Image: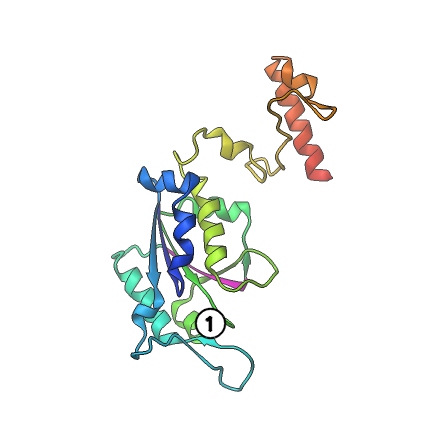
Amino acid sequence: MRFDVLTLFPGLFGGFLSESILKRAIRRGLISVNLWDIRRWALDRHRSVDDTPFGGGPGMLMMAPPVVSAVEAVQASFGDRPGRLIALTPSGRRLDQPFVAELAREPRITLLCGRYEGFDQRILDVLRPEALSIGDYVLSGGEVPAMVVIDAVMRLVPGVLGDERSAVDESFGPDGGLEYPHYTRPRSYRGLTVPDVLLSGDHAAIDRWRRQQRREAGTG
């Protein structure tokens, strides 16, 4: 699976791409993440990408010409299969696990990161991206949401997780439930002990207990 991320701050992704599961997935060729600095497509020597809004108001808006040119250039490199184009913006559809599963079936996803007060409306009118939000709160830009999308989606790509059952058993998995409690050593800690059923060796009973815990977590 290929991700292309268009951003004004590609340096924010350095640590994210070089640690843990994602690093291993990239090294194994299961995932690729390509960063594109929108300023490369700026039209003046100052590499301007934002300006004040017509009609007044606070803040700055991302300008249409560099953003549209950047997206069109990146998508043109894909040939006749540009893939999904997603703009990270608070006004978009809320990200949830069913949508994550849908995206995991795509070979290419382009993520457009907003900044400042948002996009010039003509960016959305020309490019017609899917608008996506990770929640009803304010962030400094779309970079963190882009990381959330990449992290959530890549977990469903075959081969990324060491045990494929991990994606099935997680919260919001195929059965829609939340994850059951987990325990490891020591068996007793500060007066709290591991439930006996998990030590019984009875896998059918363990499965029943875990299903019950998921149901109770979903109604709690």
Quadrant holding the N terminus: top left
**Image color mode:** rainbow
The residue segment tinted magenta is 84-91
Left or right: where 152 falls relative to 1: right
Q: Residue at x 46, y 59 (%)?
A: 143
Whole-percent x and y of residue 75? 30, 60
Does 149 sit above or below residue 75? above
Q: Residue at x 60, y 24 (%)?
A: 184
Left or right: where 215 falls relative to 76: right
* Residue occupying the far top of the picture: 201
Whole-percent x and y of residue 40? 30, 68
Number of numbered tags placed on the structure image: 1
Does 66 sit above or below residue 1? below
Secondary structure at badge 1 equals loop
Q: Does the magenta portion include 50?
A: no
Instruction: From the viewer's side, name the closer residue of 81 and 117.
Output: 117
For mark 1, does the 10 Å Cα neighbourhood hold few (<14), some (14 to 19), or many (20 or more) residues?
many
Q: Main secondary structure of the magenta part?
A: strand
Asked where in the image residue 135 lies, by quadrant, the reply is bottom right
Q: What type is the residue that disc 1 sits on?
A: Phe
Q: Residue at x 48, y 44 (%)?
A: 101
* Residue occupying the far bottom of the picture: 55
Does 119 sit above or below residue 76? below
Whole-percent x and y of residue 106? 38, 47
Quadrant holding the C terminus: top right
Whole-percent x and y of residue 68? 35, 70
**What residue would you read off at disc 1?**
119
Instruction: From the viewer's side, name the closer residue of 47 and 157.
Output: 47
Q: Residue at x 31, y 66 (%)?
A: 72
